Amino acid sequence: MLGIERYDIPHTMGSSHGSTRIIRRAQHEGPNYVPLVERAYELWRDLEDQTGRDLLTITGSVHAGAPGTDVVANAREACVTHGIDHEELSALDVNERFPGYDLPAEFEAIYQPDGGYLDCERCVTAHVEAAHAHGATIRARERVIDWSETSDGVRVRTDKGRYEADELVVTAGPWTAELLPSIADDAVPVRALMAWLQPTEPAFFTPDRFPVFVLRDHDEGGYGFPVHDVPGFKFGQSGERQEVVDPDQMDHEPTAAEEELHRRFAEKFFPAGAGPTVALRPCIQSYSTDDDFVLGRAPGHDAVTVGAGFTGHGFKFASVTGEILADIATDGETTHDISAHSIDRL
């Protein structure tokens, strides 16, 4: 088994950096995501056992929104459909229980106790360590130039060599369109920003007192975490779909306007976390046309499998989507229900 990575392991050029990524059983994206995330939890714990690394921290999760927004209703539907333990909370309930929050009085919320975060760089390292332990070779700082399918497999050409294999799995994130132009419309690279601010009340933003959150108002939204690794309250502000970029030409320097946008979000909903800026880091997310994942055999190919279009929330599923792609590459199918994410729907 050979893995080829264009950058370092881990690196900061995609969607797998910035210390933390949310994992949650309450899937407001749809009930069909719940069985996948349940398996992802199992596999992350298995990876912890294999490598001896702490990867997943449980904090609980909060989905909160203004009346008329769908994030709370959708999270509730996912929990009810799959019998997931959860609580219905008012804004006052949330603010009193978790004083780092300052939600407007009209907000409603769903609290689910099993949510938390993954240490994303540590997860990447653990996966590579586990691959090494099973005999794999991982080659970093090596760029794939092109590939071709043959009668008995594939050939891959990089800037450092040529390789032949029975199967090829493409998980190139923002560079998917470069390697698989046929699905370019379902792997659109979008620039996003992560912010860390120094809390004025640090005790409110520890993992035992501050659940991860997904929040929607009528004209803005965001997600966030307790303090971990970087000395600040981490969050991202999200409104309309952000700037589509060329991943090779993207500006990696945050602007003053982006900083101010994020500061206003924190001051509005988490004022005790809105102290001085600690860090601002961009990342690239890849969006599909319907915001669901793209998994399966690449169109027109018998030995090429692709995972793409993870739409800003794919990292929590990396353990299970890896299992799915391995199933398809080795057996031609998977026992997981990926009907909502199958490349065939496109």
Image: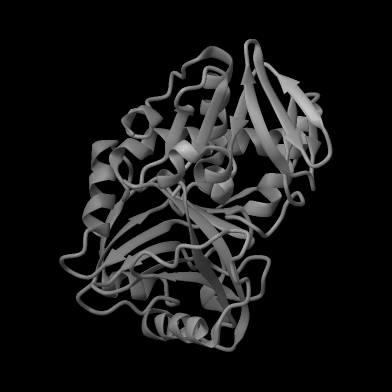
- For residue 8, side relative to residue 261 (left or right): right
Give the residue displayed 63% in from the left and 65% down from the top: 228
Towards the viewer: 247 or 21: 247
Q: Is residue 54 visible?
A: no
Number of numbered callouts drawn: 0
| Outermost residue, top side | 152
Residue 213: image quadrant is bottom left
Q: Between 199 and 85, which is closer to the camera in this rendering?
A: 199
In the current view of this chain or complex, which residue is farthest to the left? 68
- Quadrant (top left, top right, bottom left, bottom right) of the C terminus: top left
Residue at the far right in the pictured view: 160
* In the depicted structure, whether residue 191 falls above or below residue 158: below
The location of residue 92, given as percent across then percent down, is 27, 75
Establish if 200 lies above or below 308.
below
Camera-side residue: 148 or 78?
148
Residue 54 in the image: x percent, y percent? 68, 48
Q: Quadrant of residue 3?
A: top right
Residue 144 lies, in percent from the top left, at 71, 40
In this rendering, would 136 be left or right of 200? right
Q: Residue at x 37, y 38 (%)?
A: 34
Give coordinates of residue 249: x percent, y percent: 61, 65
**Quadrant placement of the N terminus:** top right
Q: Residue at x 48, y 86 (%)?
A: 257
Q: Nearer the viewer, residue 61 or 221?
A: 221
Q: Residue at x 45, y 36 (%)?
A: 182
**Could you tell me if residue 106 is visible in this image?**
yes
